């Protein structure tokens, strides 16, 4: 475990542990080109963040250049790398750069001169900004970019860039497919696993500045003194890397661990308990970030248990945190067993009337789509609908509904698709990204959350390609307008190889992968067809409850005559929750993008698509195309044998084989079921399912990772 990321000179096993921070020695010609730009390192070390910045640059430069980089207190020659802030570095101060405009996290990288010597300066207004800049400089070198005339200026568009860990205190990770929790609660605080530092390094390298340590289905025990000491220990490891810790809290904690008889947010005793708990936490962790809350959703307690609103609950916690600078991230993922309306409408129905009623330090954390992290969903209608409330995007980096760890599905295009979607809330160009980053409604408190895919597996994420989703999330959290293809290009170069043919092939494969999984799982707007509870494999026939909106038949509504969920004006009218221009498009089956057709419309199997095909023929074609795309990905990878190390190559090969088998299973089981309803023949040239429907229905999976 201590090899890899832990520093120059350690053995570097190619097992995925290094992530995208591989710092292997560059080719001789590249090293020769960089030699005049990395002759010495001038960086302060008086503060913890300054120390880890210099350590990272030493590790990176020494590894990439294949030699030890001299450390200096001042510039002695051409090619020096100078890092710091005007407060920490006399050299940076003399340059009189406008670092104030960079804000707390921004930085610049610039070719300039100091005392007649050509240097590369990494400057910021804070130590954390300088750390981010150092990682960016190393990224330029890892991807073999020229350093002759560098002029980079970066500031993040989002203030809070957070990973949400759905980790339980017993070590189990809900919807986790990379082993047990990274946090060894039993050994904390006495033992600080070196992986905690490497986790912090990886996050800092992509600008992530917050981590929620525990599951949104929270256990109140995390707020007890025993666990707060453990949280304090983790916060101490993460602090030099600019990462603040947050906790998911259970709304009923005052009852469960506080000895109160109620958790009513308007009860003075309850309010006092939370104030005292906040004081206790901040006495231990002065830079504690705040609370994440899942309330009145999937059986979790909340303010509605006391006939109070979500705003009442969030504001009570916000008042307790406000004196310390903490925030509340209140999740908008709600659905009630008592509400018989379309589940896709419930978050909007509950939260839209509360716009403007939350405290200034509350963010409403909204899933990207209105259901639940499906392979494709339309953007959540709350984006653009609550101009008086900061909305925080919630993406799922772990692949609960997209093939777990073994399916190669690059989520960058999914994230990009959602962020670029136009809400039309204030006319054309009112993108989801502009809602989230505060531009549209002039919010200064902004944030984004990603449900982590990280566990105790040696490769961190269950497969090497899943690392790309962690990486892409961080890069898009920093800049929601970034290109997912460009991000994939950087990741492949840093993680595998700079070989141009390899990079082009793998990036194309990654960019194809998301559409492939949509096609072989949930084409044309179908959704939530996965196995009940565990979400593994297809079960479009399942109607087993315990509640209708947990079953696939609720969502596809297929019968002999047609398929799809009518969310237009003749059905649940969920389309009306969007801004009028978007609602008009989604309400009309002839105008609805075919990617969302069956999300918004129940249509006959004979409906004519834009291609002229019937809906049934198009559905079969999409399922088949998805399988064929995976076969193409697998063939592409097979041609790359020998370009990278054998261990990671073989693992990806094995996983692609699993993916192709399971894509075929998805295709065949889905077609067999829908054909059993409509009785229609397959279009000419398409193969029938390999087995009868009864075979697929007989499959059971009592032990699935990430569930129960």
Image (cartoon, rainbow, N blue to C red):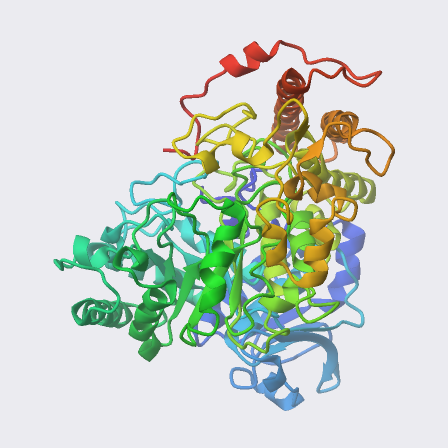
Side (left or right) of 193 relative to 277: right
Q: Position of residue 424 (x, y in %)?
A: 70, 65
Q: Is residue 60 visible?
A: no
Q: Residue furthest right?
A: 612
Instruction: Identify the residue at horizontal 79%, vertical 45% (top origin).
Output: 590
Question: Looking at the rendering, which quadrant does residue 112 occupy?
Answer: bottom right
Residue toward you, 183 or 74? 183
Residue sitting at 75 percent across and 46 percent down?
593
Location of the C terminus by quadrant is top left
Q: Answer with left or right where residue 565 lies relative to residue 345.
A: right
Where is residue 547? Give x, y as percent.
Answer: 41, 35
Of 600 and 302, which appears nearest the observer? 600
Above or below — where is 549 with respect to 70?
above
The answer to whether residue 170 is left or right of residue 421 is left
Residue at the spot 65% in from the left edge and 90% down from the top edge: 96
The percent position of residue 413, horizontal first and vertical second, equals: 69, 48
Q: Is residue 353 above or below residue 655?
A: below
Q: Is residue 204 above or below residue 185?
A: below
Tell me if I can see residue 537 in this picture. Answer: yes
Q: Quadrant of residue 223?
A: bottom left
How many callouts does the rendering have? 0
The N terminus - image quarter: top left
Q: Residue furthest front?
A: 570
Rendering coords of residue 646 (x, y %): 65, 29
- Which of these two is toward me, 266 or 185? 266
Near-viewer residue (621 or 604): 604
């Amino acid at each position: 475990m201590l090899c890899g990321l832990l520093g120059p000179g350690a053995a570097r096993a190619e097992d995925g542990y290094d992530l995208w921070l591989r710092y292997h020695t560059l080719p001789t010609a590249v090293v020769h080109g960089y030699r005049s730009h990395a002759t010495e390192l001038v960086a302060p070390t008086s503060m913890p963040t300054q120390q880890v910045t210099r350590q990272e640059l030493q590790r990176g430069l020494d590894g990439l250049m294949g030699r030890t980089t001299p450390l200096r207190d001042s510039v002695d020659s051409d090619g020096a790398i100078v890092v710091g802030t005007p407060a920490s570095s006399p050299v940076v101060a003399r340059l009189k750069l406008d670092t104030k405009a960079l804000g707390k996290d921004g930085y610049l990288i610039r070719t300039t001169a100091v005392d007649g010597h050509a240097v590369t300066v990494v400057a910021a207004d804070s130590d954390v900004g300088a750390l981010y800049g150092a990682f960016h400089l190393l990224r330029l070198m890892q991807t073999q970019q020229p350093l002759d005339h560098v002029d980079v200026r970066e500031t993040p568009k989002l203030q809070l860039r957070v990973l949400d860990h759905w980790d339980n205190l017993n070590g189990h990770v809900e919807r986790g497919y990379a082993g047990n929790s990274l946090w060894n609660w039993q050994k904390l605080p006495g033992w600080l696993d070196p992986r905690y530092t490497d986790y912090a390094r990886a996050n800092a390298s992509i600008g992530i500045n917050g981590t929620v340590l525990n599951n949104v289905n929270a256990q109140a025990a995390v707020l007890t003194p025993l666990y707060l000491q453990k949280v304090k220990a983790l916060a101490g490891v993460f602090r030099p890397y600019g990462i603040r810790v947050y906790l998911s809290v259970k709304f009923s904690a005052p009852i469960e661990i506080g000895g109160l008889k109620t958790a009513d947010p308007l009860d003075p005793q309850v309010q006092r308990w939370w104030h005292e708990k906040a004081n206790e936490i901040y006495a231990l962790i002065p830079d504690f970030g705040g609370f994440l809350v899942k309330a009145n959703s999937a059986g979790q307690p909340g303010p509605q248990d006391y006939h109070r609103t979500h705003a009442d609950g969030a504001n009570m916690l916000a008042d307790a945190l406000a004196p310390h600078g903490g925030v509340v991230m209140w999740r908008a993922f709600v659905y009630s067993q008592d509400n018989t309306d379309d589940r896709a409408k419930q978050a909007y129905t509950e939260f839209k009337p509360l716009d403007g009623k939350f405290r200034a330090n509350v963010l409403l954390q909204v899933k990207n789509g209105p259901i639940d992290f499906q392979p494709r969903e339309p953007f959540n209608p709350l984006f653009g609908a609550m101009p008086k409330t900061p909305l925080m995007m919630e993406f799922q980096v772990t692949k609960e509904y997209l093939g777990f760890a073994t399916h190669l599905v690059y989520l960058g295009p999914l994230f990009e698709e959602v962020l670029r979607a136009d809400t039309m809330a204030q006319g054309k160009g009112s993108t989801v990204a502009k809602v989230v980053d505060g531009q549209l409604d002039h919010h200064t408190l902004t944030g984004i959350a990603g449900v982590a895919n990280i566990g105790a597996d040696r490769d961190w994420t269950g497969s090497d390609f899943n690392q790309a989703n962690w990486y892409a999330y961080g890069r898009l959290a920093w800049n929601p307008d970034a290109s997912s293809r460009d991000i994939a290009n950087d990741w492949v170069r840093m993680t595998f190889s700079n070989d141009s043919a390899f990079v082009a092939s793998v990036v194309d494969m990654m960019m194809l992968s998301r559409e492939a999984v949509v096609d072989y799982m949930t084409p044309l707007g179908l959704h939530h067809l996965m196995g009940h509870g565990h979400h593994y494999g297809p079960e479009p026939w399942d109607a087993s409850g315990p509640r209708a909106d947990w079953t696939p038949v609720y969502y596809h509504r297929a019968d002999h005559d047609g398929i799809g969920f009518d969310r237009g004006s003749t059905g649940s009218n969920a389309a009306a929750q969007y801004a009028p221009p978007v609602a008009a498009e989604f309400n009309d089956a002839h105008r609805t993008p075919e990617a969302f057709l069956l999300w918004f419309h129940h249509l006959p199997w004979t409906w004519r698509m834009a291609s002229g095909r019937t809906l049934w023929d198009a559905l079969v074609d999409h399922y088949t195309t998805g399988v064929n795309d995976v076969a193409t990905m697998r063939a592409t990878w097979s041609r790359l044998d020998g370009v990278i190390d054998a261990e990671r190559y073989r693992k990806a090969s094995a996983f692609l084989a699993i993916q192709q088998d399971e894509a075929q299973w998805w295709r065949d089981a889905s077609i067999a079921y829908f054909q059993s309803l409509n009785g229609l023949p397959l279009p000419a040239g398409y193969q029938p399912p390999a087995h009868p429907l009864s075979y697929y229905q007989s499959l059971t999976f009592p032990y699935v990772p990430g569930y129960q």
